[in-house]
Image (cartoon, rainbow, N blue to C red):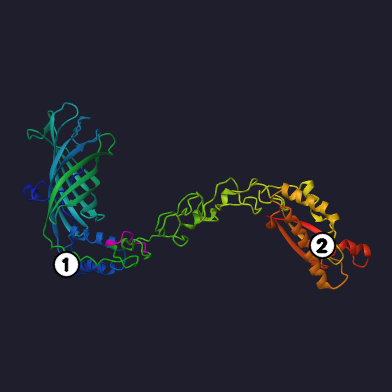
Amino acid sequence: MSATFGVLLMNPGSLALAQAAAPDPEGPATEAPPAESSVEAPSTEEVPEVDAPSVEEVPPAPAEAPSTGLQFEGGIFGGYHIFGKDLELGVPDVPGRAPDHGVQFGLRLALNFLPWMGLEAEASGIPTVDRIDDLDTFVMIYRLHALAHVAQLGKFRPFVLAGLNLGQIASTDGSPTLGGIENTDVDLGFHAGAGVKFDFTQRFLARFDARASWLPDYHDGGVTPSFEFLLGLGVKLGGAPPPPPPPPPPPADTDGDGILDPEDQCPSEAEDMDGFQDEDGCPDPDNDGDGIADGLDKCPAEAETRNGVDDEDGCPEVDEDSDGLVGSADKCPTEAEDADGFQDEDGCPDPDNDNDGVLDAADKCPAELETKNGFQDNDGCPDELPKEVQKFTGVIQGIQFKVNSASIRKTSFKVLAGAVKVMKEYPDLRIEISGHTSSEGDHDFNVKLSHDRADSVKEYLVSAGIEPSRIEANGYGPDQPIAPNATKKGREQNRRIEFKLLSN
């Protein structure tokens, strides 16, 4: 295979000045305006579109250097040639005497008649040896091929080529013999390859080629491949200078958020303009970064405290009362939980756990409900009335008065003395003494009489040493009967004195 870009060796002086050229547009001067319009049109159309690509696509245009006339390109190159072992070249009646691999150098000249296509001629030499006797051998290769640029990537221009090549054997002393055997072997073949050019400037370039060539083999009249890899330098001559690049389009605002793309960190996403970092051009769906979108975040400027309590509301939970409970878990956010082991999870202090009206601090039984029976109701514990106290609750039998009078009969003193004893034994007792009558007689008189009789009993107890504050005296007359007034027995039952224990 041989990969050498066509340069005819017959004019090495002119070829030494040439370097691998960028394709130059061919054609009459009438074609120049279309070339210029093709550059300018995108500049006006790309403004409303995506700016970044438009800016990147404009610079490559000058690298193509489109012109209105023919352009010449010349250059030098060097590389390495890998001959096929079955090559017929250099094997006149001596099979296996094909040239060995070797360094290759040469010149090239190109005529570009279109901006992307041209013809190229090359001449190159390969000093080597034959594969049997290591006899010095010099191989000349001449090429003519068409070259087409397939893309413009900034300053890089990839290309492909294909054409014909001619290989010729010469000995090192200049005689047409090889190893004593006359050798004027010349073979015709074809080649193809690809490469890339790099434009240093509008005139100077570098180039890399990789090619395969096919020349006859000595076995069956077919062809055998050889390969070559070349590096070169080139210069472009002639042709009109390329048009100036269009001015860069004004900065665009792709997402329409009022922040130009060069300053917009998110040019394809509109800023939400919510007052939070609006200058960066990026939407901020979660300003406080707590994982809850602002539309659902009750506190978009304050990060949620991830503590398992109301984590979905987006607000930090503050423990205002410092009781260790926050958010909806604290039903009394401004009152500290008393942490007394009773309903401590609600965040509310429980001053009266059993709700018996006796505060826990004074409640001897904070988990048990006080029995409101008038007996030791201040200790907070459930209790039963002692039997001796029970005797002096309800209707007190044996207390009698003179007819239509509040004067106590002497027969009643024994009963009253028993009441005094009980009240002294239980100093926390408080009682109500209530007087009652039957319905006989005047109602108002009966009410007053019942009240006077209750007062008489109270006076007796007070005179016996009971504190007046522990006794209330009331008269209800006939208004609270416990038996029918229609019978004598019923009326007798309704005429009574009752003791009732009062809560402290």
- Above/below status of 81 relative to 61: above
How many residues crowd around disc 2 within 10 Å: few (fewer than 14), some, or many (20 or more)? some
* Position of residue 274 in the picture relative to residue 333 (left or right): left
Quadrant for the C terminus, please: bottom right
Q: Position of residue 309 (x, y in %)?
A: 51, 52
Q: Position of residue 393 (x, y in %)?
A: 79, 54
Please provide the residue range marked out in magenta: 262-271
- Tag in front: 1 or 2: 2
Residue 407: assigned label:
2
> Residue flagged by tag 2: what amino acid is it?
Ser
- Above/below status of 231 relative to 329: above
Residue at the spot x=22%, y=53% of the render? Answer: 157
The magenta stretch spans residue 495: no
Q: Residue furthest left?
A: 13
Q: Position of residue 69 (x, y in %)?
A: 14, 63
> Residue flagged by tag 1: what amino acid is it?
Pro
How many residues crowd around disc 1 within 10 Å: few (fewer than 14), some, or many (20 or more)? few
Q: First in sequence: mark 1 or mark 2? A: 1
The magenta stretch spans residue 265: yes
Distance between the alpha carbons at the discs numbered 1 and 2: 150 Å
- Above/below status of 136 relative to 207: above
Q: Nearer the viewer, residue 204 or 298?
A: 298
Pointer 1 residue: 28
Residue at the spot x=86%, y=55% of the render? Answer: 411
